[in-house]
Amino acid sequence: MNPLANLLFEANLLKRVPRSGFHFLGQGHESVAEHSFMITFIAYTMTQLEPQADALKLISMCLLHDLPEARTGDLNYVHKKYVTADEDKALHHMLENIPFKSDIRELIDEFKQGETVESRLAKDADQLAFILELKAKIDMGIKGPETWVPIVISRLTTDTGKKLADAIMQTRWDDWWQHGYTET
């Protein structure tokens, strides 16, 4: 049980590992764990729209895809031009005494390869989480995020991802509570 406890402590560390892309936005912050929650919730939503997708696989993939960042940190697109994180080595060390290590590795590898319906949906969920952040900032009058939106939307590969992105971009970030609001 000790290796499992260590893995849980390591996964818990993701609550304190910052996502580095926000540096380039000039504002905002998010931990890797916060990001993982959001894309996992988006994936859950996608399973309701894509019944042919294996829901457990998709949700698990989203939950686990950034697990190696507990050891490597989060490298954004600029960092990756200059620094290479050995995520395979990090994952190998992280999982070496875990009985279900092959399940975790297979899910992360499948995510990276992006060849299955679940991995394509997971990658779109990853981008949709960022689109939600960008749209909220745009709606709050922050300048800059609007230039990122077309780039991020262009990364989407599934019809479901594209439809969700379209709905996000047509909806104000605070419409969910302001719609029909009254003081009574």
Image: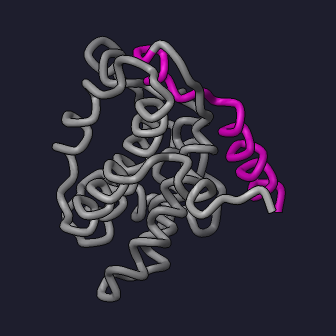
In this picture, residue 72 sits left or right of residue 10: left
In this picture, residue 55 sits left or right of residue 111: right
Taking depth in this image into account, of 46 and 165 the one nearest to the observer is 165
Q: Is residue 21 magenta?
A: yes
Residue occupying image coordinates x 48% and y 22%: 22
In this picture, residue 176 sits left or right of residue 12: left
Residue occupying image coordinates x 30% and y 12%: 82
Q: Residue 53's image quarter?
A: bottom left
Taking depth in this image into account, of 135 and 1 the one nearest to the observer is 135
Residue occupying image coordinates x 16% and y 43%: 154
Does residue 68 appear in the picture of this structure?
yes
Taking depth in this image into account, of 40 and 175 the one nearest to the observer is 175
Up-down relation of residue 121 to residue 148 (above or below): below
Q: Residue 122's image quarter?
A: bottom left
Does residue 92 appear in the picture of this structure?
no
Q: Specify how the rendered protein is coloured.
A: one colour
Where residue 181 sits: x, y (%)? 66, 59
Taking depth in this image into account, of 137 and 67 the one nearest to the observer is 137
Query: Which secondary structure is most common in the magenta stretch?
Result: helix
Q: Residue 165's image quarter?
A: bottom left
Q: Classify the position of the C terminus by image quarter.
A: bottom right
Q: Which residues are magenta?
A: 1-25
Residue occupying image coordinates x 46% and y 51%: 65
Where residue 32 sits: x, y (%)? 58, 38
Up-down relation of residue 75 to residue 112 (above or below): above
